[in-house]
Amino acid sequence: MARMYYDEDANLDLFKDKTVAIIGYGSQGHAHALNLKDSGVNVIVGLYAGSKSKPKAEAAGLTVKNVDDAARTADVIMILLPDEVQKQVYTNEIAPHLTQGKALAFAHGFNIHFGQIVPPETVDVFMVAPKGPGHLVRRTYEQGQGVPCLFAIYQDASGQARDRAMAYARGIGGTRAGILETSFREETETDLFGEQAVLCGGLSALIKTGFETLIEAGYQPELAYFECLHEVKLIVDLIVEGGLEKMRDSISNTAEYGDYTRGNRVVNEQTRAEMRQILKEIQSGQFAREFVLENQAGKPGFTAMRRQEAAHPIEEVGKDVRAHFSWLKQK
Ligand code: NAD
Ligand code: MG
C-alpha cells in the first residue's frame, strides 16, 4: 500500500513568517482559509471587487483583499476559483506578482496539467487536493479530524516545495486523516475519470435509466424514485463502511443473488469499452479542449444541458416526495 503521511511528517513552522493567500471563498476556499487560520497560519483571502463572499469572510475574522493585492502580499498563493476561470484571473492578477521564491498552489491539477496556466520557473508549484467537499473539510477540522488529501509537486524551485505542500496539508487538517503523494497528471486524469464514468456521470445515468424503465412500464413515480434514487444512499453507506462484502451481508439473499446475476448485464463489456474511450479522451486532452472551448464560447451547451436535466421527471417527483416525508429533510 502506498505510504500515507500524518501530522508528525509535516512541519507547519515553515509557514511561521509566511502569508498564505486563499483566492476564492467558495466550497474549498472558505474551508482552507478558516482551517489555516485556526492552525495559526497568517491567512488573507483574495476576492474580486463586489464579491458576495466578502462580508462572510470578514465576519469569520479573515482579512480580505482584492486578488491583485492578496497575490502581491502573499508568499503562498492557493487558487480556489472554479477551474474554468482560473486562467484569466491568474494571467491578469496573480502572474505579475509571482516573484522568485513564492509558491503557487492548486486543489486540482487541470489548469497546470493541460497547460492553461504556465507559471514562471522560479516559483514552487504544488497541489493539495482534499478528497471531499469543502463543507466536510471544514466540519471535520472543527471536530478534530480531517479529510484525507492528495498532494503533488509540479515544480520545486525553492528546494522546499514538498515540505511546503505537506505543511499546507497539515494546516487544513489533511495530515490528521492522512495524505497520499501523487503527480499532477495522475490526480487530474483519475479525478476526471472518476467524476465522469462513476461518481457523477455514471451514477446519474444509472439512476435516471432505472427510474425511466419503471415509469415506462407503468409503475408509480414515487416508488420508482425510492427504488432507484433514494435507496442509493443506504447501499453506498454500507459499501463505504465495509466494502461490497458488508453491503452484501446486510441485503437479502434474493437481492444478493440478483446482484451477482444481473449487475454485469447492466454494466457490461460495452460499458467497459466506453469507459476506456472516456479515459482516452481525458488522457489525450480532448475532454479538456472541449471544456475550455465550451467556456470560451459562453457555455451554450452547458447551459442547455443544465436546463434539460433540471426538467427531468425524477427531479419533479423528488421535490414532491422530499416535501412529504419530513424524515427525509433531516440530513
Ligand atoms: P466554488 O465554485 O465553490 O468557489 C469558487 C469561488 O470563486 C467562489 O467564491 C466564487 O465567488 C469565486 N469566483 C467565481 N468566479 C470568479 C471570478 N471570475 N473571479 C474571481 N472569483 C470568482 O469552487 P470549488 O468547488 O471550491 O473549487 C475550487 C477548486 O477546488 C477547483 O480547482 C476544484 O477543482 C477544486 N476542488 C473542489 C472540490 C469540491 O468538492 N468542490 C474538491 C477538491 C478540489
Ligand atoms: Mg473532481
Image (spheres, helix red, strand yellow):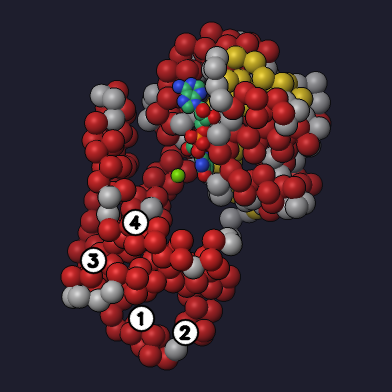
Q: Amino acid at mark 2?
A: Ile
Q: Quadrant of the C terminus?
A: bottom right
- For the residue carrying disc 3, how many other residues have a C-alpha within 10 Å: few (<14), some (14-19), or many (20+)? some
Residue identified by numbered label 1? 259
Circle 1 SS class:
helix
Residue identified by numbered label 4? 315
Q: Residue at x 46, y 66 (%)?
A: 324
Q: Is the Cβ of the residue at disc 1 closer than 8 Å to that at disc 2?
A: yes
Looking at the image, can residue 118 be seen? Answer: no
Circle 4 SS class:
helix
The answer to whether 87 is drawn above or below residue 93 in the figure is below
Circle 2 SS class:
loop
**Image quadrant assignment for residue 68:** top right
Percent position of residue 263, x then y: 31, 76
Q: Quadrant of the N terminus?
A: bottom right
Q: Amino acid at mark 4?
A: Glu
Q: How far apart are labels 1 and 2 at the CA level?
A: 10 Å
The answer to whether 243 is drawn above or below residue 52 in the figure is below
Residue identified by numbered label 2? 251
Tell which of 239 and 4 is nearer to you: 239
